[in-house]
């Protein structure tokens, strides 16, 4: 019996020690698990904080940019007017556009526009008379309030500076992009226009896409009609300009 006890005792001590080790390991695992959960919660809170901060930053930036825009518009005391009806523009005017194309021979002194490119071969494919397809013209044309060209020494109401090019194979049609440059006691600044000049139509519209000076940030429509054509080298357009967004 004593021998049995002597034999059994070492086994009992080993089992007790083993159980103690398991218990300690379980405690350590529990502590590690708690620490991991704590760190995960902290990381989640940090991520939420970053998201809120980023969102708040975007809101602050948007408000800042809006403030800059509003400040720029109001810096010189102007207020924005937007028309509520097509029949009630905030500003309107009628002007005449004169184009004198350089003929390459004898109108150097009077010419206000010149072809920068020649028509392409496609210009006569579908129309034997030619549509000038691909021809680009640059211009610095006088703009007047009446139909007559300015006499010698007389300043025009404005100058139209830009280009047009012929862009249809089947018929004569052009596309314009230019600025009306005003520099007189009546008006100073620019109006920027662009659009298709569909020459077969009695009237066509150009978009007024912006402006500077007295026409700061102007928006509207310029209705174009052909007033006179004299051969290939001179034409006059009537422009009825209506602005529907103005700063005054």
Image: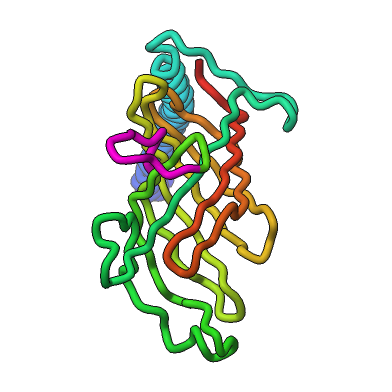
Tell me, yes or no, if residue 30 can be seen here: no
Of residues 67 and 158, the one drawn nearer to the viewer in this rendering: 158
Residue lying farthest to the front in this orientation: 151
User: Magenta includes 149?
Assistant: yes
The colour scheme used to paint the residues is rainbow
Q: Quadrant of residue 199?
A: bottom right
In this view, 237 is above or below 22: below
**Where is residue 12 drawn, in percent x and y?**
41, 43
Identify the main secondary structure in magenta: loop
- Depth order, front residue of 63/32: 63
Residue at image location 67% in from the left, 24% down from the top: 83
Query: Is residue 84 in view from this perspective?
Result: yes
Across and down, in percent, residue 174 comes to: 52, 65
**Residue 222 colored magenta?**
no
Compared with 120, 21 (above or below) is: above
Q: How many marks?
A: 0
Direction from residue 183 to residue 241 in the image, left or right: right
Which residue occupies 33% across, 73% down?
117
Q: Quadrant of residue 36?
A: top left
Above or below residue 188? Residue 198 is below
Residue drawn at x 52%, y 83% is 130
Q: Residue 188: horizontal and vertical position, in percent?
A: 36, 25
Q: Which contiguous range is marked in magenta? A: 148-159
Residue 107 at x, y = what percent?
Answer: 29, 63
Rendered residue at 64%/53% (across/down): 204
């Amino acid at each position: 019996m004593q021998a049995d006890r002597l034999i059994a005792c070492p086994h009992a001590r080993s089992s007790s020690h083993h159980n103690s080790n398991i218990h300690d390991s379980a405690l350590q695992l529990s502590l590690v698990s708690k620490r991991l959960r704590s760190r995960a919660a902290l990381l989640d809170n940090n991520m939420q904080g970053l998201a809120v901060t980023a969102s708040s930053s975007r809101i602050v930036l948007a408000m800042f940019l809006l403030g800059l825009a509003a400040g720029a518009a109001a810096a010189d005391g102007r207020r924005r007017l937007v028309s509520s009806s097509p029949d009630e523009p905030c500003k309107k005017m009628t002007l005449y556009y004169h184009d004198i194309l350089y003929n390459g021979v004898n109108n150097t002194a009077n010419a206000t526009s010149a072809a920068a490119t020649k028509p392409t071969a496609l210009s006569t494919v579908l129309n034997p008379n030619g549509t000038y397809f691909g021809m680009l013209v640059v211009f610095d044309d006088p703009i007047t309030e009446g139909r007559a060209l300015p006499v010698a020494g007389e300043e025009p109401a404005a100058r139209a500076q830009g280009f047009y090019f012929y862009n249809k194979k089947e018929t004569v049609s052009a596309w314009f992009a230019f600025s009306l440059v005003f520099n007189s006691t009546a008006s100073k600044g620019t109006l920027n226009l662009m659009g298709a000049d569909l020459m077969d139509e009695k009237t066509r519209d150009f978009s007024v896409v912006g402006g500077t000076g007295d026409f700061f940030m102007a928006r509207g429509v310029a209705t174009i009609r052909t007033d006179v054509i004299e051969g290939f080298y001179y034409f006059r357009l009537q422009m009825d300009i209506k602005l529907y967004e103005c700063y005054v």
